[in-house]
Image (cartoon, rainbow, N blue to C red):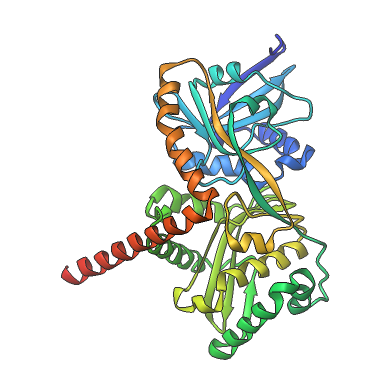
């Protein structure tokens, strides 16, 4: 139970005072578990600009802010981790030794249920509410030596991939022009190109097009402008000659870089531009002081190629006794269970991917036909 010297206050994330932001940053700095940029107040504030239900619960001990839980709440009291579906790290960010009563926390937030899907492993008070844990691959980056060429670094870091990747890069340079990589591209014209490529990829593969949602477009455009110590929006681009080949946008903190949206020119897919992008980013991020590249939850072949180890993240529902909480769990758990079953079994995942790609092809063809008819 929390003591009489404890309290919980609720705030809009974009309205946090400078003092509270600094306290949040100190909590991030105190533990490597919270160094991920998705756990920074800048990310929560960005979501808060475009999501009316965004809030932050601040835990106080002896009048000192010691913990921060960013979340979103709807009118029925259903809560979810802030940016659920977009964020690759979720947590109540707190100072060492701080704990909490989950029932009291939910009550203070006005929540009957709190849903999460990328909860960092350290969050013990939420432990009994975790319904499953999943691998989140990471790359441990070494200190970059500025004198090493990219080719030398690649042969040392990924000898199995080096020959094939360098061959494709040389072929791309011969076909289109000299290869050039910009880790922190400030030309704003590159960001709409990335979004256009990514939208096309979502449609081809039958996935939900995130960039069809205006608030996500607005959020990414906003985060691209954020350049703070604990959160910087990084846009990276691979060029061949003057032509952009692949692009990526994602956040970084001082020590952690989180790949987020990667896409490439589909006409150039046979050169493996997405893999080239991730390898180039890994080298550049290491040279720029990043120590961990968090690839996020999900089974992808390229993640298995690049990872050095895995973290564990949890999904589940923290609940209070309430009819809304029970209804939400009954609705969401079967959907999650089916998705996780498919993702965990390659024999099911591959047919599901083929089905989604077929749907995407039909959807794209239908859209072209409608356009011609119009």
- Looking at the image, which residue is at 71% across and 36% down? 22
| Residue found farthest to the top | 4
* Residue under the image location 78 percent in, 26 percent down: 97
Q: Position of residue 157 (x, y in %)?
A: 77, 69
Which image quadrant is residue 177 in? bottom right
**Residue occupying image coordinates x 66% and y 66%:** 281
Query: What x and y, as percent, mark residue 341?
Result: 50, 44
- Quadrant location of the N terminus in the rendered image: top right
Determine if residue 52 is in view.
no
Q: Quadrant of the C terminus?
A: bottom left
Q: Position of residue 188 (x, y in %)?
A: 51, 65
Q: Is residue 185 above or below residue 35?
A: below
Residue 244 rendering spot, x and y as whole percentages: 52, 76
Look at the picture and state if 163 lies above or below 207.
below
The total number of labels drawn is 0
Side (left or right) of 215 relative to 7: left
Can residue 160 be seen in this snapshot? yes
Give left or right: position of 197 versus 92.
Answer: left
In the displayed image of the protein, which residue is found farthest to the front? 347
């Amino acid at each position: 139970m929390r003591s009489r010297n404890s309290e919980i206050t609720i705030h809009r994330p974009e309205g946090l005072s400078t003092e509270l932001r600094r306290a949040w940053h100190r909590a991030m700095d105190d533990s490597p578990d919270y160094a991920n940029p998705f756990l920074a107040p800048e990310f929560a504030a960005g979501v808060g600009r475009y999501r009316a239900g965004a809030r932050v619960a601040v835990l106080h001990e002896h009048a000192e802010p010691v913990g921060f839980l960013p979340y979103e709440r709807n009118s029925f009291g259903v809560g979810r981790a802030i940016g659920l579906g977009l964020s690759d790290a979720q947590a109540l960010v707190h100072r060492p030794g701080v704990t909490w009563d989950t029932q009291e926390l939910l009550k203070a937030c006005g929540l009957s249920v709190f849903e999460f899907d990328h909860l960092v492993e350290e969050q013990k008070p939420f432990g009994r509410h975790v319904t499953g844990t999943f691998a989140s691959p990471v790359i441990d980056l070494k200190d970059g030596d500025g004198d090493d060429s990219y080719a030398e670094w690649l042969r040392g870091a990924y000898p199995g991939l080096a020959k094939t990747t360098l061959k494709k890069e040389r072929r791309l340079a011969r076909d289109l022009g000299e290869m050039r990589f910009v880790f922190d591209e400030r030309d704003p014209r590159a960001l709409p190109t990335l979004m256009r490529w990514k939208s096309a990829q979502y449609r081809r593969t039958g996935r939900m097009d995130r960039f069809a949602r205006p608030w996500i477009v607005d959020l990414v455009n906003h985060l691209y402008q954020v350049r703070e110590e604990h959160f910087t929006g990084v846009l990276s681009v691979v060029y061949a000659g003057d032509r952009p080949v692949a692009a990526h946008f994602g956040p970084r903190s001082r020590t952690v870089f989180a790949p987020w949206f990667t896409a490439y020119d589909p006409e150039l897919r046979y050169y493996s531009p997405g893999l080239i992008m991730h390898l180039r980013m890994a080298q550049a991020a290491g040279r720029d002081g990043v120590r961990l590249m968090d690839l996020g939850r999900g089974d992808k072949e390229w993640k298995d190629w690049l990872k050095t180890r895995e973290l564990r993240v949890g999904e589940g529902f923290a609940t209070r006794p309430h009819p809304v909480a029970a209804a939400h769990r009954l609705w969401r758990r079967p959907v999650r269970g089916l998705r996780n079953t498919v993702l965990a079994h390659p024999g099911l995942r591959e047919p599901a991917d083929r089905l989604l790609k077929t749907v995407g092809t039909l959807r794209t063809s239908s859209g072209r036909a409608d356009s011609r008819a119009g």
